[in-house]
Amino acid sequence: MPDIAKIRRLYFDPPPADLERLPSREELYAREERQAVERCLLSGGDPREDALGEHGSLIGGPGKPLRRFTWDPEFAPGSHTPLPLPWFDHPRTTSRPDPPPSAEEVRIFFGHLAAGHLAGYPGRPSGAELSRIFRAARMTPVQRDQVWHVFACIHLWDLPGLLYPGGLSVYEVARAIHLSETLRPHVTAWINLFGAPPNDDT
């Protein structure tokens, strides 16, 4: 359960933006509430009528109308960005699964992703080709677009599959996210679980 008092403090006094720090749950709730007020005002609405900001219970406190979110603030659009790539460059994240999956397991897994999320894409890559694209340190514009489409549509239960049976390291997944400029909250929140500051020896 988020700390409501902390959300209220952060609503009025947000911390400075810092892309090298994961926001707390309370920061995400406070940010989403500020943005909801801004969206309401920009569209000509009245935050009081919509129970937003200080006019709703989340920020205004007891006695104000209950605040109902249309999406989870922890996974709202723009709520997460991937941590910088150096945060994934340590032994625990650069190693691949041990024992490694077979070439056939890798081909089948990436073939499943290509068929499920690139159906109708001109020149759709095979499973083996998509696996090589995900491992690449550089991508062509078409490859970046293909990887972006996969991340835009991937089922959340398939994300761990990128590691096994996909055979990628966490670093390779993070690099693919960065190269494809993926900002899907569920994907970036998942990969950020593996990040550690570059000077962290843990």
Image (tube, helix red, strand yellow):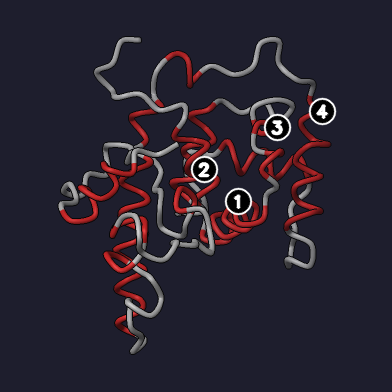
Q: Quadrant of residue 124?
A: bottom right
Seen as rendered, the residue at the extreme bottom is 44
Residue 174 on image: x %, y %: 48, 37
Of pointers 3 and 2, the one earlier in the residue sequence? 3
Per the image, the residue denoted by label 3 is: 161
Q: Earlier in the sequence, mark 4 or mark 3?
A: 4
Callout 2 touching callout 1 (CB < 8 Å): yes
CB under 8 Å between discs 4 and 2: no
User: How far separated are the C-alphas under marks 4 and 1?
Assistant: 20 Å
The answer, for residue 68, to whether it is visible in the render is yes
Query: Residue beneath label 2, please?
Result: 176
C-alpha distance separating marks 3 and 2: 15 Å
For marks 4 and 1 on the same chain, the one whose residue lies earlier in the sequence: 4
How far apart marks 2 and 1 lie (CA) works out to: 9 Å
Is residue 92 positioned above or below 56 on the image?
Answer: above
- Give the residue number, with chain letter if any, for mark 1: 151
Residue 133 is marked as: none
Task: Give, as a three-letter code, the residue at label 4.
Answer: Glu
Taking 168 as reference, is 58 left or right? left
Along the line of sight, which residue is nearer the eye, 74 or 6?
Answer: 6
Please give left or right for residue 95 compared with residue 122 in the image.
left
- Of marks 4 and 1, the one in the foreground: 1
Q: Amino acid at mark 2?
A: Ala
Q: Could you give the CA–CA distance between mark 4 and mark 2, rounded to whole angstroms?
A: 20 Å
The kind of residue on which mark 3 rests is: Gly
Say whether disc 2 or disc 1 marks the residue closer to the N-terminus: 1
117 shown above or below 91: below
Instruction: Identify the residue at horizontal 64%, vertical 17% (top origin).
Output: 97
| Residue drawn at 40 percent across, 28 percent down | 195
Q: Is residue 88 left or right of residue 21?
A: right
Count of marks overlaid on the render: 4
